């Protein structure tokens, strides 16, 4: 039987109620929540390597499995600190950490971006 759009396709995008049920399922068990958070951290880091908007996406992905908004915000901030540490380690391995820190204002913008964008993305926890 076809739906209101007339295409009859049963494989449509998940509805908001289904998404909420799935997130509740993840949030109710600590082991599932930890697993989902770890996957979100590494997926967000992969996105952040490709584009700075990945910091926003990573913060959102990290916050979604959390039970409360406050925990989601802390998760987003933690994700930002983690990406900042990975970036610093990458610069240290390349021998450019001292030069990067010496740039002053430019490194301040990088640090602020690494902390603010994931925090902003983690606000999506308040929506779902």
Image (cartoon, grey):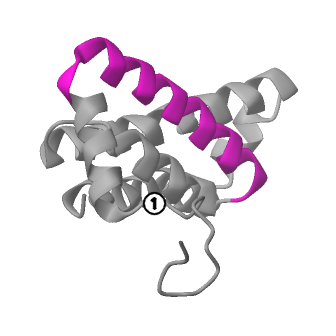
Q: Is residue 19 left or right of residue 117?
A: left
Q: In this view, does 68 lie to the left or right of 80?
A: left
Residue 91 placement: quadrant: top right
* Vertical placement of residue 48 versus 112, above or below: above
Q: Please give the name of the residue rendered at 23% of the width and 18% of the height, measured from the top-left corner.
A: 29
Q: In this view, does 48 lie to the left or right of 25?
A: right
Residue 68 placement: quadrant: top left
Magenta stretch, overall SS:
helix
Q: Residues within 10 Å of mark 1 (few under 14, many from 20)?
A: many
Q: Please give the name of the residue rendered at 41% of the width and 52% of the height, measured from the top-left corner.
A: 60
Residue range corresponding to the magenta coloring: 28-51
| Front residue of this view, candidates 108 and 30 | 30
Expressed as whole percent of the image width and height from the top left, the position of residue 61 reads: 45, 45
Q: Please give the name of the residue rendered at 68% of the width and 25% of the height, measured from the top-left corner.
A: 89
Count of marks, rendered view: 1
Expressed as whole percent of the image width and height from the top left, the position of residue 120 reads: 36, 62
| Front residue of this view, candidates 97 and 121 | 121
- The residue to which callout 1 is attached is 117
The quadrant in which the C terminus is found is bottom left
* Residue lying furthest top: 31
| Front residue of this view, candidates 96 and 65 | 65
Residue 7 on the magenta segment? no
Residue 50 on the magenta segment? yes
Q: Is residue 42 left or right of residue 32?
A: right
């Amino acid at each position: 039987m076809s739906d209101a759009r007339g295409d009859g396709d049963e494989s449509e995008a998940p509805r908001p109620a289904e998404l909420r049920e799935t997130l509740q399922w993840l949030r109710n068990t600590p082991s599932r929540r930890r697993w989902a958070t770890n996957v979100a951290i590494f997926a967000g880091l992969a996105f952040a390597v490709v584009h700075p908007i990945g910091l926003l996406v990573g913060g959102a992905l990290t916050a979604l499995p959390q039970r409360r908004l406050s925990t989601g915000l802390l998760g987003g901030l933690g994700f930002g600190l983690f990406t900042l540490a990975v970036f610093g380690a990458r610069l240290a391995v390349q021998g450019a950490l001292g030069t990067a820190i010496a740039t002053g204002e430019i490194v301040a913008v990088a640090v602020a971006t690494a902390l603010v964008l994931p925090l902003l993305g983690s606000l999506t926890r308040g929506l779902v």
